[in-house]
Image (cartoon, rainbow, N blue to C red):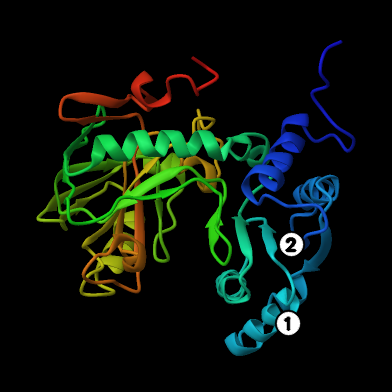
Amino acid sequence: MARPTTQAGGLPGSAERGAQNVVERCLRVQPGEDVRLFTWRADEVAALVTAAIKRAGGAITRVPLEPMERETNKAYLRRSFDETLAGATASILIASHGMPALLSIAATEAAESAGSRHLHAVSVDARVMGQSMRADPMKLAVINERLVEMLRASRVRVTSDAGTNLEVSLSSKLPIAKSDGRPAQGRWDNIPSGFVCAHPGDVSGTLVVDRSVAGPTVVADPAALRKNPLKVTFAAGRVEDVECGDAKILAGVNAYLGSHTDAGRVGMIVMPTNYLVRSEIGLQIQDGLLPGLSIYLGYTNAAITKAAYDAPVQLRFFGRRQTVEVRGQRLVQAGRFDATLVEGIDPFR
């Protein structure tokens, strides 16, 4: 008999399998475990996660966050999360697009303080749950380790047909961090997951940003960016020049660059490893995990990357159909993982 492709309520069966993966493999809920589920305007996805927690035997308490949507008192929000998380050893936040940043920050800080394993899923929908969130964290860990070994103390070359020609140097003195969506006790992780990141020793050359720009001062419609790509030139790890045929996008980027002394400094390079992300769906939370190399300006996450500085601002650049090479070995070819990274893992090969 053919496997059903939809479940009750019309959501795809793959979304249900994604929820099960998140609960059983990522959050690792145990029978009788006290679990908090925070939700913000994501009833369909939250229902899938609720059902998966119950199947795993977890004792679930659902906490809607909509009543705190307009709250701006950071101390009050933190106290509210602290009280709610008391006694919980696992927690997860599921939110649709647009959740206030203060809520998000309060949740992660309180979860760490409470000693909870916490998963953070912001701007997600059933498509994300049925695609990138189905990725097995154990397989992501394998790909991450392969990639780290290839990247360690190396020079990375990134090119694209659109004009990207970038060189990134990684220092042997700085770590390459990995994320697979399996937080340790008292830690948190974003999902969908699967990437490695590092603070680079040097970045030089040209990056064509034709997928997306993510930051507080820039609102770039993907269609507009594809029509008028952002061309960013780097030298000595800093932005040297920016060009774009769209005046609004260019103004937003320049406003960001003027916001802090280190706003134009490359804080991190990120290489996704989620083998189930194959094409754009129009949601940055998943599209940002397409194969390639992304540049994050400003914020270095110094506690993890061990960078010598940090910055309170961030702007993220994403390009399309990139080719990534290390010491002549191809890791990504025109936006697709090379077999050296996903051999024995990628179900599409």
* Residue 149 percent location from the top left of the image: 28, 37
Q: Is residue 150 visible?
A: yes
Task: Tell which of 185 and 148 is nearer to you.
Answer: 185
Residue type at numbered disc 1: Glu
What residue is rendered at 55% in x and 44% in y? Answer: 283
* Residue 36 percent location from the top left of the image: 75, 65
Q: Residue furthest top?
A: 1
197, above or below 127, in the image: below
Q: Residue furthest left?
A: 236
Q: Which mark is residue 258?
A: none
What residue is rendered at 31% in x and 64% in y? Answer: 300
**Of callouts 2 and 1, the N-terminal one:** 2
- Classify residue 334 as left or right of residue 273: left
The quarter holding residue 188 reads bottom right
Q: Which quadrant, please, contains the N terminus?
A: top right
Residue carrying label 2 = 39
Residue carrying label 1 = 83
Instruction: Determine the secondary structure under disc 2.
Output: strand
Instruction: Determine the secondary structure under disc 1.
Output: helix
* Residue 7 percent location from the top left of the image: 85, 32
The quarter holding residue 258 reads bottom left
Query: How far, Cα to Cα, is label 2 from label 1?
Result: 16 Å
The quarter holding residue 311 reads bottom left
Q: Residue furthest front?
A: 31
Mark 1 surroundings: few (<14), some (14-19) or many (≥20) residues within 10 A: few
* Residue 315 percent location from the top left of the image: 35, 60
Task: Tell which of 259 and 8 is nearer to you.
Answer: 8
Residue type at numbered disc 2: Thr
170, above or below 97, in the image: above
